[in-house]
Amino acid sequence: MASLKAYKIVIAETAPVILAGLVTCLKNLKDFHPSVIEVDSPESLFETVTADMIDLIIVNPIFGGLLHPAEIRKTSLNPDIKIFAIEISKLNRATLSLYDNHFHVTDDLNEISSKIMSAIHLENEDLEEKENLSSREKEIISYVVKGFTNHEIADKLFLSVHTVMTHRRNIARKLQIHSATGLTIYAIVNKIVDLSEIKL
């Protein structure tokens, strides 16, 4: 399970009270003791993600000015890195959609734990079931072959666009199918969709 892996979490936040609170929350997670790295500037954040395999970043979206998750993902050594926003004041839906998930400063330990463990579970599911598709992946395949865009799938499943794209990469890797036609044939043969549901 996840506790066997040296899970590395970076917290990017300049407010000492919020930073200390998050570190305490992470240290009190049941059956999970990640290695926590604190960074206090965008420069140190980028240095960390380019030098080490970081699994999760928890970041204030206005950390050091407006910080875009796509820039972090581009430089990260880990292609499957998860990035969570710390919501201190109300963030709009467009901003939150750039992140894999978010915490609000008023969230309790159970809510924080649930969100982190959910991210870890998705990763472990991929590792443990290399060739088996998860139910979420099958759901995404059904939308893809029906002609939905990544944005439409994200809206339907209440996911970020990045998460949908990550699922699609995992699907392509597991099935070794890299074309829409191939995926459509796979979906029909494996009864993920019915032929009548597909726009020809």
Image: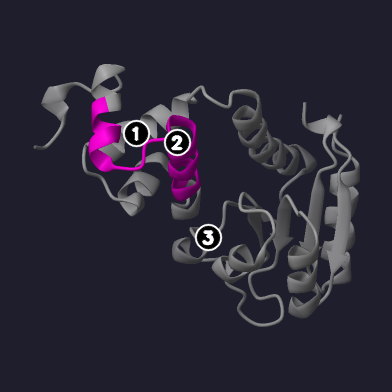
Q: Quadrant of residue 188?
A: top left
Q: Quadrant of residue 48?
A: bottom right
- Give the numbered dot on residue 58: none
Left or right for 165, reference 19: left
Q: CA distance from mark 2 to mark 1?
A: 8 Å
Q: CA distance from mark 2 to mark 3?
A: 25 Å
Neighbour tally class for label 2: few under 14, some 14-19, many 20 plus, Cα within 10 Å: many
Dots 2, 1 in contact, CB < 8 A: yes
Residue denoted by label 1? 141
Q: Earlier in the sequence, mark 3 or mark 1?
A: 3
Dots 2, 3 in contact, CB < 8 A: no
**In this orientation, which residue lies closer to the viewer: 18 or 135?**
135
Name the kind of residue labelled 3 in the image.
Leu
Residue denoted by label 3? 96
Q: Is residue 180 magenta?
A: yes
Boundaries of the magenta span: 164-185
Neighbour tally class for label 1: few under 14, some 14-19, many 20 plus, Cα within 10 Å: many
Q: CA distance from mark 3 to mark 1?
A: 24 Å
Residue denoted by label 2? 171
Which quadrant: the N terminus?
top right
SS type, badge 1:
helix
Q: Earlier in the sequence, mark 2 or mark 3?
A: 3
Residue at screen point 71% across, 81% down = 64
